[in-house]
Amino acid sequence: MESLDITPNKQKTQTPVFDNILRSNQSFRPISSLQILKETIRILISNPATFISIITILIYPVSAIHLSNLFIDQSIVKTTTKTLLFITKSCGLPSMPFVKQSCQKVSELVISTLVSFPLYCTLLLISKAAVVYSVECSYSRKKFVSSKFFVIVRTVWRRVVSTYMLVCALIVGFLTLFVIVLICVVGLLYAIGFSHNAIVCIVVVTGLLFLVVFAHTLIICDLCMVISVWEDVSGAQALMRSRVLIKGQTQVGLVIFVGSTIGMAIVKGLFEHRVKNLSYGDGTSRVWERPVLVLVYSFVVLIDFMMSTVFFFSCKSCSLEAVECGM
């Protein structure tokens, strides 16, 4: 049984290969987020050298640039913030503190994403494919072969990138729609005469509702990236495949997403506080804190990629069981 033997016209044979992997691993039955985490740790422990290499070569450079904002020009961030503030004032929004802070955060996020986008489209996508291949090798009891992996990357690269571009467009469109709706709602409430506290409460509730919908969207998008590596589908087809595959497993995916997001936010917050904000006089303490925190962040990203892949196996396993029961 070949592991992830992907060729341009391999759609008909990929599913039997995958079915054999699942059926030959009867112990593979993670159905909860905790079980998926345990399965992820088991895979990580079974082949630590491969995943350490993925962190060192692929994930660590992206994490270092993402956390340190190395190539971001603060003057551009300030200009973008002023532009957003001008737009919000033109829409009738009051100059409240949370509006200014939101504009500042959005500016930093937009500039950081644009600067890091080439790395996201290269190293991060390759690391995602490497994790999928490594997990598959673990289930098929094969060794990670670098030469074969690069052949696979060349084969699947076009559809992975096209899927990633569609995912980015979907996320940007979703966020833009939310910002437009939020500006309109807040402007209307302010014009009606709602108090500052009431507007803040309504914004918080609206934001929470948005986060739930947005998290569900991100889970589908994350799963479709794994699908684009494994199966011969891309773009909208991968999204639809992900949407069908995740049925009945949405809560598990949401817990995984929340856990990964919290973990990344904690490490990023520590980096902001310990490396960027604190002053140590001669700065010697930050010499070791910076690489350590970047390494921890990279490890969290790796665990997130691995859990997404294991979650894909779990959803696929449940789908196969449902088909066999129906037969």
Image (cartoon, helix red, strand yellow):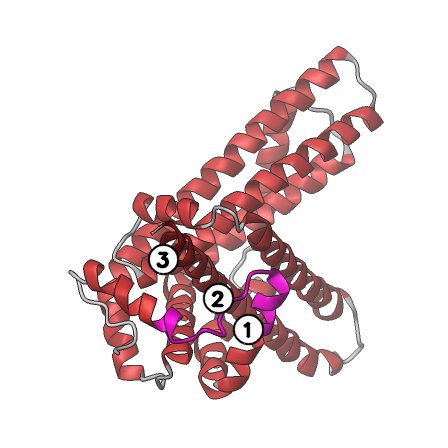
| Cα gap from disc 1 to disc 3, whole angstroms | 19 Å
Q: Residues within 10 Å of mark 1 (few under 14, many from 20)?
A: some
Pointer 2 and pointer 3: residues touching (CB < 8 Å)?
no
Q: Position of residue 166 (x, y in %)?
A: 36, 45
Q: Is residue 163 magenta?
A: no
Q: Position of residue 219 (x, y in %)?
A: 51, 50
Pointer 1 and pointer 2: residues touching (CB < 8 Å)?
yes
Find the residue positioned furthest to the left.
9
SS under mark 3: helix
SS under mark 1: helix
| In-image side of 147 versus 305 (left or right) | left
Which numbered disc flags the more N-terminal residue, 2 or 3?
A: 3
Residue under label 1: 39
Residue under label 3: 227
Q: How many marks?
A: 3
Residue drawn where x is 39% and y is 64% of the image: 125
Q: Is residue 288 visible?
A: yes
Residue under label 2: 310
Displayed quadrant of residue 140: bottom left
Q: Choose mark 1 or mark 3, whichever is in front.
A: 1
